[in-house]
Amino acid sequence: MSRSHLASLSLAVALALSSPFAMRSVHAEVPPPADVAYPGTVTIDVDATDTAQRIFRVKQTMPVQAGPLTLLFPAWLPGNHAASGPIDKIAGLEITANGQRLDWKRDPLDVFAFHVEVPQGVSSLSMQYQYLTPTGRDQGRVVMTPNMLNLQWNAVVLYPAGHYASRIQYAASVKYPAGFQAASALDVAGRAGDTVQYRPVSLDILVDSPVYAGRYFKTIDLAPGAKVPVRLNVVADAAKYLEAKPEHIEQHRELVKQALKLYGSQHYDHYDFLFSLSKQMSGNGLEHQRSSENGLGTDYFTGWDKKAGSDDLLGHEYTHSWNGKFRRPADLWTPNYNVPMQGSLLWVYEGQTQYWGNVLTARAGLRPMEASRDALALVAATYADNRPGLEWRALQDTTNDPIVARRRPKPYRGYQMSEDYYSGGQMMWLEADARIRKLSGGRKSLDDFARAFFGIEDGEWKQQATYTFDDVVATLDGVAHDDWATFLRDRLDGKAPLTGGLEASGWKLVYKDEPSAYAKAQMKDGNGAASFIYSIGLNIDKGGNVSEVRWDSPAFDAGVGTGMNIVAVNDIEYGKDALEDAIKAAKDGKAPIRLMVKEFDRFRTIDVDYHDGLRYPHLERIEGTPDYLTKILSPS
């Protein structure tokens, strides 16, 4: 080989080794998880007392052996369906052994992995670091306030690679602020002052057992006298928000009863709703097998209107104890929190949960029959008239959205689509329910599927039973024989509409010039927001900012875009009433509706040629057909 060729080869090798692709061959490998017990018990101690600066301070002690060790921060989070672990908020990591500080290196290709070399003679590592929780909503979900906190273990734990999460034991403790009471699915082993020690559990159970704690705290027994306790643990911004009317509490107890009638089983040894009522801590809804995280506004109890009813959040998250936690789609189950998940069956995991959450909320009386129908009308209208994205994107593809969009807001959601497997799935399962009832002459329903599919093995809660598409089809066929594979695929792949369940259940979608009582209550909760999405094509916040434009609506076709600010309507300062009056007036005339809009530093007038008046979704009975919907929403 000539010197020139040798020099060229040396340069090529040097460039190759310096390229990002070469790092794949030289960086330390992350050991894959194995179904092997990790030796010893890891201790994790969290100091949660700094609610002013909103910092969780963490210490871990981990038994180890000499040699290379990889520590993992959870990336793929159950219930989030994406690699959304808040690794950016971990700071101050120090690792020591026998009093000596050890160097660590973050993996250049997997930033959730930290490599450390354990010296000979070392049997235990000590780690300390901080989880710097968001101090504003622009940084993420606020989880600490002066009066409450939400501790999610996945946000504060580092765990050893190379093992299933179920094979790593953890002994956890938390020091809470003075005067705080805490609730979790974890069992308490002991207390010392403000510090609570929890009984050791495997990592998968630890991560599945978050904590809500607060100064203003109340526990409500939702299953008095039952062998398996179910509790509603509430924290609030102030004591007054904890006051609830007896009949409202009774509806929550009925929610538990109706769920047990539906599934015929309990896959937990006790269940704890963790519920925050706050304007300070961010809202939340996240499922766990023995608990759930739920967060709504302060007036959930004090502003209760029995005619409008309550939110379906508790019913949704409770359902997940069966659907998603006890039985989980096979491609969503992973052996630890750093193996990628796949969401191909989220239309079951979330879609059927969305269906049952609304149905159980109705059956419990938490949402009255009329309000339940009105709530369904809003969902049906979405898939009848506000999802033009279904022309180019199938419902099945939206199961990729947690990874694609990471739950970031979208400017034209109806056209882009989002996580439509929730409500689109709800509509599909409504049609399946009506179909079963028709096929069986009313003798069977989707209730029978729920019991056969999720109600198995009563009393088992540690098992993670997975399922596939074929399992779903086989169980449906066992309830009522039909070509269920084609039925599901046609709707998932965009070959059939998602609104067929309405007429199949004896009702139809219509539009009226007045919103339903339920819709009015929803708009009231929106603090001045206005919805004209099915008329002119706009949703607008109280400040006049356009939050949504319906694709190909009159406003969109005229040039109105999301993010614009409406300053005036027909030369009158914008207000909800001003636009409402303009839409009413245009119905009887030919003149367009004039919108003065502000776009950045520009003002201009947009003429919207719309003359069909106000339109709000409602449901109406189809006379002469079976009314399956009323049966579906009625108590068992």
Image (spheres, grey):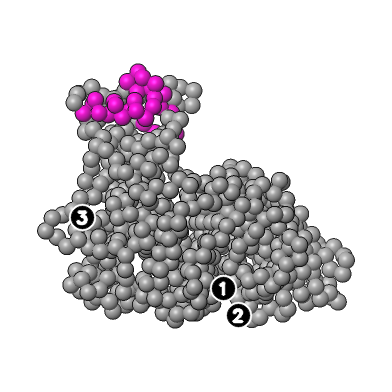
Check disc 1 and report the residue beneath it: 335
In this rendered view, identify the residue nearer to me: 542 or 633: 633
Cα distance, mark 3 to mark 2? 51 Å
**Quadrant in which the C terminus appears:** bottom left
Vertical placement of residue 472 versus 368, above or below: below
CB within 8 Å, label 1 to label 2: yes
Image location (x, y in percent) of residue 400: 44, 58
Question: In the picture provided, is 330 more to the left or to the right than 355?
Answer: right
Circle nearer the N terminus (1, 2): 2
Question: In the picture provided, is 101 more to the left or to the right than 89?
Answer: right
Check disc 3 and report the residue beneath it: 507
Counting other residues with Cα less than 10 Å from the Cα at mark 2, is it few (<14), some (14-19), or many (20 or more)?
A: few
Tell me the amino acid under the disc marked 3.
Trp
Stretch in magenta:
560-587
Question: In the picture provided, is 468 more to the left or to the right than 480?
Answer: right
Cα distance, mark 1 to mark 3? 45 Å
Q: Secondary structure at mark 1?
A: loop
Counting other residues with Cα less than 10 Å from the Cα at mark 1, is it few (<14), some (14-19), or many (20 or more)?
A: some
Q: Secondary structure at mark 2?
A: loop
Q: Which mark is residue 348?
A: none
Tell me the amino acid under the disc marked 1.
Pro
Tell me the amino acid under the disc marked 2.
Asp
Check disc 2 and report the residue beneath it: 35
Closer to viewer: mark 1 or mark 3:
3
Circle nearer the N terminus (1, 3): 1
Residue 187: in magenta span? no
Q: Residue at x 27, y 76 (%)?
A: 479
Image location (x, y in percent) of residue 599: 45, 27
